[in-house]
Image (tube, rainbow, N blue to C red):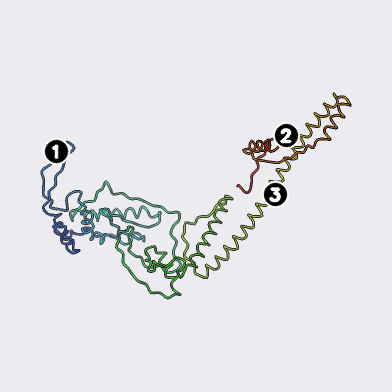
Amino acid sequence: MVKVRNPAPPPISDDTRDLIIQRRQAIAADDKESYLTGHKQCVQVPGGERSTLLPINIGIFQGSCLGPMLYNIASIGAACYVPSEVNGSLVRMARYADDTQLVVSGPKERLPEIQTALEGVLDTLATYFLQNGMKINAAKTEMMVAGGRSALQAAERDPLPAMDWGLFKSEHMELYQLFLQTEAVYNCVSELGELGAVQFRDLNPNVNAFQRKFVNEVRRCDEMERKLKYFEREINKDEIPMLDTGESPEAPQPREMIDLEASFEKLENELKEVNGNSETLKKNYLELTELKHILLKAQHFFDEKETQHVQEGIQQSLVANDEVGRQGASGQLNFVAGVIKRERVHAFELMLWRACRGNVFLRQAEIEEPLEDPVSM
């Protein structure tokens, strides 16, 4: 459990109005002091009636843009009564405009204990605000739980000291200038990247991106990322399940990058070779399957014509047969068989009719078996 002060902390001052003015003067904001004096406000009901105008003796009038700033000034002391840890989990207090957030990180197994401890902290803060002329809006107070896929793992090396940074762009920031040796730059920048609390400024904005010092290293990283995305596409294409550990790996050392680059290059070449061989086999299989259907359909067509020719020959005389034979021998009849897509049959038939000037006999038969083209898959 969390240790809190009991009884609750006393108010900072008996007169909250004077306290706010005093703190605002400390930050050179006395030009807005007129917001606290010389103003009156009333309450208006839905019927249109208003109450008597009363002077503002605490805070500012409703709707003033100065309210969020005054709230942040008046609630500075509240952070002193927020514990830094709850059952071994870090606690941070973030204030934005007139909202306050308590952010706690911890395992879900300890959620009831953390919730009980936070309720005690909220009671202490409620007493603090009440004694300083403020009140927590219970209707807008809620607790949200954001779960993760896996629990946090302990770091193998000594963890860096906890830093008190916030979640908003309006948080206080400081500007530093770092001087590092070339050999230590990679490790230092990787550690800062793990923290995620640093923003770097470009001191050479006029330098072309291709003329920067580490552009080759960045290109190598981009190339490795491209290979990883290629591996991911191939894995998803074959519907192979991928294990998601939910962890973000640390930045590898430069010597490890060389090994990873060589491994990715080898795997990419092998995978491309396998895909090329597989595509070639599928194309050969498709061609042989089409040829099989062509032979079957053509054989069926010629068998029908031969049967029909024999039946007609029985009914005709020998003289007529000789004439038909001489006519068939003098003519030059050729045939072509192949496979074409269904949607192109009409255009193909029209082209043959125009090219042969109408002297063409076209017969088509559908292939019931679905054929997959490896190129268009």
User: At 14% across and 45% down in the image, what residue appears?
Assistant: 42
- Residue 56 screen position, x and y as percent: 13, 51
Residue type at mark 2 is Asn
* Circle nearer the N terminus (2, 1): 1
Asked if the residue under mark 1 is in contact with the one under mark 2, i.e. CB atoms within 8 Å, the reply is no
**In the image, is residue 201 above or below residue 230?**
below
Secondary structure state at the residue bearing disc 3: helix
Residue under label 1, please give it. 49
* Circle nearer the N terminus (3, 2): 3
Residue 272 marker? none
309 and 216: which is toward the camera: 309
- Residue 345 screen position, x and y as percent: 65, 37
Disc 2 packing (10 Å; few <14; some 14–19; many ≥20): few
- Which one is in front in this view, the residue at disc 3 or the one at disc 1? 3
| Left or right of residue 360, residue 243 in this image | left
User: At 57% across and 62% down in the image, what residue appears?
Assistant: 264
- Which one is in front in this view, the residue at disc 2 or the one at disc 1? 2
- Residue 78 screen position, x and y as percent: 24, 59
Residue under label 2, please give it. 359
Which of the 4 quarters of the picture holds residue 118? bottom left
* Circle nearer the N terminus (3, 1): 1
